[in-house]
Amino acid sequence: MEKNYYQKELETMEREQLLALQNERLVAQVKHVYEHVPYYRRLMEEKGLVPADIASVDDLHKLPFLTKDDLREAYPDGLLAVPKGDCVRIQSTSGTTGRRVISYYTQHDVDLWDECCARAIIAVGGTNEDVVQVSYGYGLFTGGPGLNGGSHKVGSLTLPMSSGNTDRQLQFMTDLGATILCCTPSYAAYLGESIADRGIKDQIKLKAGIFGAEAWSEEMRRDIEKALGIKAYDIYGLTEISGPGVSFECEEQAGMHINEDHFIPEIIDPETGEVLPYGEKGELVFTCITKEAFPLLRYRTRDITILTDEPCSCGRTHVRMKRPMGRSDDMLIVKGVNVFPSQIEAVLLNEGLSANYQIVVDRVNNSDTIDVMVEMTPELFSDVAGSITAKEKSIVNALKSMLGIYAGVHLVEPRSIVRSEGKAVRVIDKRKI
Ligand code: DLL
């Protein structure tokens, strides 16, 4: 099969050549930031660094890290590297606590971001013949604008649906024959349920989905693929670094290629900051080497993953990251045990349940409790009460062997957990209140 790339030369560049490009871009970027961002210059000076100390990617580890706290401290424009007059857009994170994080874009930045999203669309087989339904939120959230821009670059017919209003989503999907769906995996699963409810699966022309912005699992991928009759692909990104399209899956569905000509990835030990080799699990850090307005260097994402530079049969040479396994800051510590919501999800899906669940953590009599509410399948719901109790027990045991601790399991009625049109709220940690 003829392979399709949006920017073949860049996406399939020999690693040696790619490294040379990264070196050149990094040196220029460090100089740009040092000269135009007093906040960052101060951080470099504190480490006794001047731009000449960074001659190549090998010197990257010398640079200070940036964290969300720096972004909050520098809010709203303390990390801006160009005059405001050169910017054409801002986007912002979905965070609800503390100060918002704002990312600025010049037209050049928007173009590069759109190109990254175009790469993702082409990688799933998209062409100008496709009808791309963008059901990520539009506005400050980067999901809608990012995939919208990518779809324009590819020349596909773009349906800028934004999230919500499921009836309207399904009407456009069927009437206009959408072939590629872009939204959060939880909304994709919900659309799948809604399609089944309405008995309209035969009117759906979708062939692929580009789903990201929240953690999901291989099991959830299989469920969505079945419900929508498509191939489902992962896409990753964060507002601070641009938005969706920092990395994306190719037809192999085996990890997301990081757009390394724009972003240099590192994996670090979240405790010590030490750089870890490919293959080791740690926190993902990005350095932006092509952005003008908001070029973060060594930004700590808090996402935990593993990088691999093993060749991919799609022909792309850019390293791949595994789907994020949680966040170094969102990780739950229950009874002293590290718990990732994704582990719980994997158990539930393995037990044949849906991804509609909620984890409630509390502290009772000075002791942590963890309870998982999960919706029954309609089959299970109509079963006798005895088998529900047996099912709960079986999940409790499966969770115990996965997590090493007891978690209460409560099977609840189908459709009783509130659906999200954006990112699902999976964890309620009452201990913080
Ligand atoms: O979620 C950007 C995005 C939009 C990505 C649409 C993909 C699709 P933020 O709101 O800034 O930006 O949230 C970024 O979401 O640090 C991860 O923790 C999480 N995240 C994003 N993509 C994935 C994914 C957008 N594919 C934060 N799998 C990131 C798991 C993801 N987590």
Image: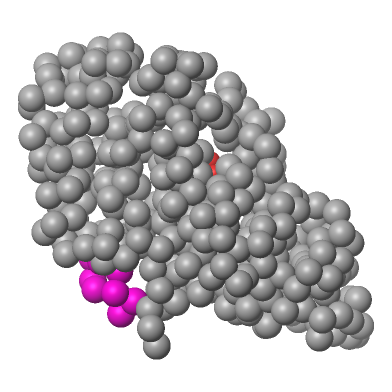
Query: Residue 18, image x and y in percent?
Result: 18, 55
Apparent side of residue 194 relative to residue 147 in the rendered image (left or right):
right
Residue nearer the viewer, 104 or 159: 159
Residue nearer the viewer, 95 or 273: 95
Apparent side of residue 372 relative to residue 332 in the rendered image (left or right):
right
Apparent side of residue 140 relative to residue 317 in the rendered image (left or right):
right
Residue at point 28%, 39% (across, down):
289
Of the 4 image quadrants, the one containing the C terminus is top right
Residue 227 versus residue 159 in the image, above or below: below
Find the magenta span and give its range. 309-317
Residue 263 colored in magenta in the image: no
Q: For residue 183, which quarter of the picture?
A: bottom right
Residue 316 colored in magenta in the image: yes
Residue 71 versus residue 207 in the image, above or below: above
Residue at point 11%, 31% (across, down):
54
Query: Residue 99, image x and y in percent?
Result: 58, 21
Query: Residue 388, image x and y in percent?
Result: 82, 78
Apparent side of residue 114 relative to residue 428 in the rendered image (left or right):
left
Query: Residue 241, image x and y in percent?
Result: 42, 39
Residue 415 visible in the shown view? no
